[in-house]
Image: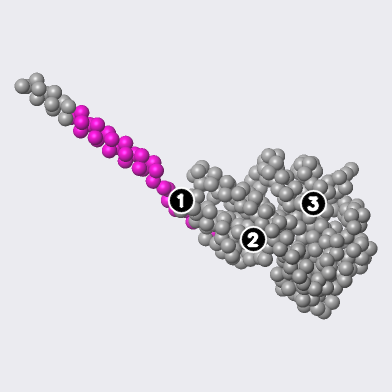
Amino acid sequence: MKRNRFWMMLGSFGLILTLLLSLLGGYAEAQAQKPGPKITWIFATNPGPGANSWSFHPYPRFQKLLEQRSGGRLILDTKVALYPPNEVVHAVIAGRVEMGWERIPWLAGTFPLWDVCLPFLWDSIFEYEAFLNDPRTVEMDKKTYGEKGLVKIADICVEALDTIWAKRPFATVADFKGVKIRTAGLIPTLALKLMGASPLTIPTAEIMEAMKRGTVDAIQTNRGWGLGFGLPDVCTHVSFWRVQSVFSGMLIVNKAKFDALPPDLQKILLDTGREMQGQTMYASKIDEYQSDVGIKVSRLKAIQPEPAEINKARELARPVIDEWLKRAGPHGKEVLAIAGEYAGGAKVMLKK
């Protein structure tokens, strides 16, 4: 009897021990699966009629995807127009905001290496996408953005600022001689000057009035933006010259803030950014198609210059590449060499 009681007590103890270990294991597993604390970042962006800004405002697709995939652990508090479009990057570097979206061509004078939107270089946005996805480009971005205290999450761009809006056609290079034209950044300003034009800088809000009064003869911008801004009301012609072959935008994070994230959130952020990069490339082509339809149904006359004239412009604009190399620093040649493997205009623009 005593022996049976001993074994019964021992069995009960074993059962209790097993249950206890099971409970402890379940608790440990629950703790491991328990989501970490919620992190809220300020995300600075700016409004715009182009497809490259729609994923952030007014349609916050990127923000929603990031929240969903992180299980609500990483939230972006979007601030529209918190800083002017050319000051967002400086706010991110300084840590005044954790994340931002910035148009790269407007910063070509400050960060020239990142602006590879060179005249007549890219024949398609998908050429540019292939260049961005090249592992050498990815590593170069990681290095050069990191040196400025940034992590580049994605390049969110549109097809091109390829349209000259005016009250007359621009069918030949000779048509640009002496023309007062409003440009959008350093690269097209240099290119149009070499083509014989007189580039001017005019605030966006004053463009329509400048065209009405004749302060400028033409506006250089993209198709969708021109249609959305109302340029068909003051122009009669659109002529297509890829003096700015892509219009890029950097989705960036303060590096210290990024490094402080748990590894899984870092991966979610990078993966979601890369996905949005591809989606906006496609959206840009849709935007371009819709813009072409809008131009066709308007009273505007669309001018597509002959290939021979485009090649003349390419030859005239080639010194822009030399100027870019002077400004871009020690990595400029390497970046251009990679671009030359993908860009349709490389044979002319990058020839020695």
283 relative to 2, above or below: below
Badge 1 element: loop
Horizontally, residue 139 falls left or right of residue 335, namely left
Residue sitting at the far left: 1
Residue at 65% x, 55% y is: 280
Question: Which residue position holds label 2?
Answer: 53
CA separation, marks 1 and 2? 25 Å
Q: Are marks 3 and 2 in contact (CB under 8 Å)?
A: no
Kind of residue indicated by mark 3: Asp
- Look at discs 1 and 3 and give the one toward the viewer: 3
Kind of residue indicated by mark 2: Ser
Badge 2 element: helix
Q: What range of the chain is rendered magenta?
A: 13-42
Horizontally, residue 227 falls left or right of residue 66, namely right
- Look at discs 3 and 2 and give the one toward the viewer: 3
Residue sitting at the far bottom: 213
Question: Which residue position holds label 1?
Answer: 71
Observer-nearest residue: 249 or 223? 223
Question: Which residue position holds label 3?
Answer: 123
Q: Is residue 150 visible?
A: no
